[in-house]
Image: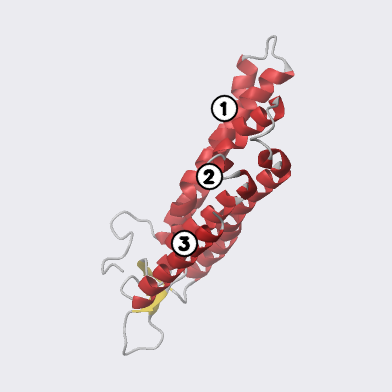
Amino acid sequence: ASIIPFGCSVGYDYVDVLLATTFGPIVLVALIYVAYEVDCCLHSEGMEKEDKTKIWTRYYQYFLYLTYLVLPSVTVVIFGMFPCQNVDEQEEDQYYLRNDLSISCSSERYTTGVTIAAIMIVVYPFGIPLMYWWQLFRYRGIIQNRSTDNTQQIADIASKYGFLYESYEPRFWYWESVEAIRRIVLTAVLSVLSASSSTQSVLGMTLSLLYIGLYSQCK
């Protein structure tokens, strides 16, 4: 926690940071789609369906790369909207947001931030791993047999989703979703606990050992 209020010198607070951090990637996704449409328009003359599919695959990859890169950092900011701390042990109701002591946890501003964070939990830490799983689940049969089959369909799937599964054995086609959850838990969820608390260290080590055991079982 900081003694100086989070945005005292620049006129913003943690809720503003939450909004910028969570809506920023959504704006980038919209720009990726706009770039795709512009690309299609620029090459519309003589364009065949296969050419448009290739362009869509390229921009869809940009979208997936973006989700992969922003997931941990955005989730940390989202979960940072919840923990409060008592700034005066002599008073019972002096709870302020741990990441921004200018926001009282009994204020409407805090309620607004928590509401936004709750919605964004569905979009990011739940939505992105679920999206990875669903996209791969649709083609799991093809992905599992990719080492024996060599068809254009496999090549098309690999060009779009390859980075989500090519690092894993065919039978573990879903593992990137597990890995995404691991990154979320070990970064964002643990950040809710106080950094000075031994609970954070113990829980972090326990979860790491659990994942190591899970990895060893799935070799």
Query: Which of the two discs, 2 and 3, labels the residue nearer the N terminus?
Result: 2
Residue at 46% across, 61% down: 212
Amino acid tagged 3: Ile
Q: Which residue is mark 2?
A: 67
- Can the viewer see residue 124 in this picture? yes
Q: Quadrant of residue 64?
A: top right
Give the quadrant of the C terminus.
bottom right
* Residue 141 place in picture, x, y as percent: 73, 42
Q: Which residue is mark 1?
A: 35
Label number found at residue 212 = 3
* Residue 156 place in picture, x, y as percent: 66, 29
* Residue 62 place in picture, x, y as percent: 54, 34
Amino acid tagged 1: Ala
Give the quadrant of the N terminus.
bottom left
Amino acid tagged 2: Thr
Residue at 64% across, 18% down: 41
Relative to 1, say whether 129 is above or below. above
